[in-house]
Amino acid sequence: MNATGQRTVAAVTRHLMPPLGPMYLIAYIDRQNVSYTPSCRWSAISA
C-alpha cells in the first residue's frame, strides 16, 4: 500500500474506532442480558 493509502486507512480508523468501541461493548452486554432471560417470560409476552 502506498503512503496515501496508509494515511487514508489511518484517518478512517482514527475517526471510526472511538464510536465503534462503545457500540460493540453495548451490543455485547445486551446480548449477554438477553441470554440470561428466562424462556418462560418470552412465552408469556408473545401470547
Image (cartoon, helix red, strand yellow):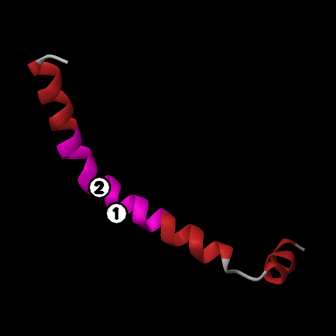
Residue 41 lies in quadrant: bottom right
Residue 16 % position (x, y): 26, 45
Image position, residue 44 (x, y; %): 86, 80
The dot on residue 22 is 1
How packed mark 1 is, by other alpha carbons closer than 10 Å (few <14, some 14-19, many 20 or more), is few
Amino acid at pointer 2: Pro
Q: Main secondary structure of the magenta part?
A: helix
Q: Does residue 3 appear left or right of residue 5 in this picture?
A: left
Corner quadrant of residue 2: top left
| Contact, mark 2 vs mark 1 (Cβ under 8 Å) | yes
* Residue beneath the point at 20% across and 18% down: 1
Residue identifier under label 2: 19
- Element class at badge 1: helix
Secondary element at tag 2: helix
Q: CA distance from mark 2 to mark 1?
A: 6 Å
Q: Nearer the viewer, residue 36 or 42?
A: 36
Residue in the picture at 44% in, 67% down: 26
Dot 2: few (<14), some (14–19), or many (≥20) neighbours within 10 Å?
A: few
Q: Residue shown at 21%/31% (left/top)?
A: 9
Q: Is residue 7 above or below residue 26?
A: above
Could you tell me which quadrant the C terminus lies in? bottom right
- Amino acid type indicated by mark 1: Pro
What is the x, y in percent for residue 33?
Answer: 59, 77
Residue 20 highlighted magenta (yes or no): yes
Residue visible at 67% across and 80% down? 36
* First to last magenta residue range: 13-27
Query: Is 37 left or right of 6, judged from the image as shown?
Result: right
